[in-house]
Image: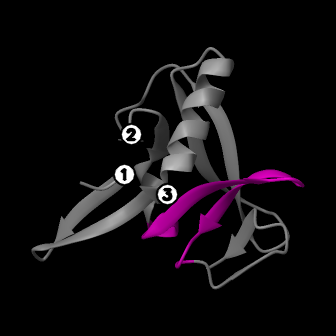
Amino acid sequence: MTNGLTATIDGKTIIMIKLTENAIEHLTNIAKDNNKKFVRLSIKGGGCAGFGYEWSFEDEETKTDAVIKDVLLVDRMFELYLLNMELDFKKDIFGSQFVFNNPMAKSSCGCGTSFSI
């Protein structure tokens, strides 16, 4: 079993979005700290590379949402931008951040929060 959202295409299972254990733990903690049930990941136009990741909090899912590990919401219209992405959370002495390992991104900015396709 994977920590993510999968789809079956032509008999093959494809990972749409995978979460590491660190990402699941951090998402769960920040949802709880903000008295919300879910954390939402969206894609918006803009940023230095063309598209950016955007975070928000929700209590309810919509009929177009994919729910990943009971904590992360992603509207299915963004799946194309996130296909096979792994979301990790890294923490070290200098700080902490989500790390987007997105194979759909052709390039990304230095801060890692915007990308182009």
Q: Residue at x 9, y 74 (%)?
A: 11
Residue type at mark 3 is Phe
Q: Where does label 3 land, which residue?
A: 78
Which one is in front, 32 or 6? Answer: 32
Q: What element carries label 2?
A: loop
- Amino acid, disc 2: Lys
Q: Which type of secondary structure does the marked residue at label 1 adopt? A: loop
Is the C-beta separation of discs 2 and 1 under 8 Å?
Answer: yes
| Residue drawn 58% across the image and 70% down it | 101
In the depicted structure, whether residue 28 falls above or below residue 113: above
Give x and y (percent) for residue 104.
53, 78
The magenta region covers 80-104
Q: Distance between the residues labelled 2 and 1?
A: 7 Å
In this picture, residue 112 sits left or right of residue 69: right
Q: Mark 1, residues whose alpha carbon is within 10 Å: few (<14), some, or many (≥20)?
A: some
SS category of the residue bearing label 3: helix
Residue 97 rendering spot, x and y as whole percentages: 75, 52
Image quarter (top left, top right, bottom left or bottom right) of the N terminus: bottom left
Q: For the view shown, which residue lies furthest in the left direction?
A: 11
Give the amino acid type for the residue marked by disc 1 in the picture: Asn
The foreground one among 109 and 19 is 19
Looking at the picture, tell me which residue is in the foreground, 88 or 116. Answer: 88
Residue marked by disc 2: 69
Q: Report the Cα–Cα distance between label 3 and label 2.
A: 17 Å
Q: In which quarter of the image is residue 5?
A: bottom left
Task: Say which of marks 3 and 2 sits in front.
Answer: 2
Q: Mark 1 points at which residue?
A: 3
